[in-house]
Image: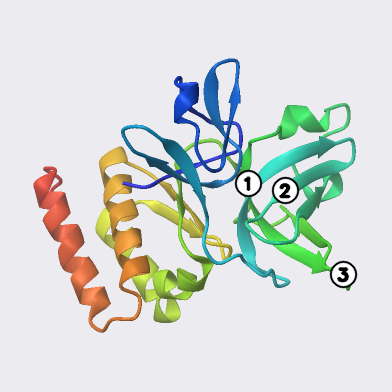
Amino acid sequence: MRRIVLPGDMLSSNPRAAGYGTYVENGKVYSKILGLFDESETRVKVIPLKGRYLPSTGDVVIGIVREVAGNGWVVDINSPYQAFLPASENPEVKPGKKTNDILDIGDAIIARVLNIDPKMKVTLTMKDKICRAIRFGRIVAINPARVPRVIGKKGSMIKLLKGELGIQIIVGQNGLIWVNGDRKKVSIAEEAIYIIEEEAHTEGLTDRISEFIKRRKSDVGIET
């Protein structure tokens, strides 16, 4: 199963295995980019996420902190344009607390696009009940172009996943999806999301996903 990796994640202790999207430091191989981990017998590499996201005001996104400044954070939102989260737009900021005590490099967040200026400078906010720092759960990465199919008409596909598995799911418009709950159920949801991504163009997908979830729950001993 594909696994999303963040910049700086250790991938291998064999420096000779370093491939695309990686770098070697102190004899170990690390991810250079946000992407999908791919491993063979002789090589490890990181595949960049497909279909870069073009932000729109109001979008919910999942981002990775790349830089920490005194007045906020530079955030990678899987887009050609980096985003900035001002400290004033993070409710966790309190007097006397340093920005890197609240969010540090490599931390993941759920945020909303507050503003995009004419030069495509993207400003984020976390002043929304859906927004949070991601301290647990799993992030699943898909092609941003497939996000509408994962959500479904009037949210039908997400309702199906949540209802059948009893887990939390927040879909970022930028192709990153936060899934949280029982580990086995989260793994089933991840598999289902990848199927939706691959078969987004086909008919009868909702029914097939429903049957897939029921079958996988039975396989791993989860009562239906």
- Most extreme residue toward the top is 26
Q: Amino acid at mark 2?
A: Val
Badges 2 and 1: C-beta atoms under 8 Å apart?
A: yes
In the image, taking residue 26 as reference, residue 148 lies left or right, namely left
Identify the mark at residue 19; answer none if there is no mark: none
Q: Is residue 174 above or below residue 187?
A: below
Q: How is the image coloured?
A: rainbow
Task: Kindly identify the residue that appears in the image at 26 percent across and 76 percent down.
Answer: 205
Q: Is residue 166 visible?
A: no
Task: Kindly identify the residue that appears in the image at 89 percent across and 35 percent down.
Answer: 70
Quarter of the image where one finds residue 56: bottom right
Q: Does label 2 or label 1 sit earlier along the sequence? A: 2
- Residue 167 image offset from top left, x and y in percent: 36, 51
Report helix, strand or loop for mark 3: loop
Q: Amino acid at mark 3?
A: Asp
Between the C-alphas of marks 1 and 3, the distance is: 22 Å
- Residue 71 image offset from top left, x and y in percent: 89, 41
Q: Which residue is mark 2?
A: 75
Q: Is residue 139 visible?
A: yes
Identify the mark at residue 117; answer none if there is no mark: 3
Identify the mark at residue 109; answer none if there is no mark: 1
Say few, some or many: other residues with alpha carbon within 10 Å of mark 2 (under 14 / 14 to 19 / 20 or more): many
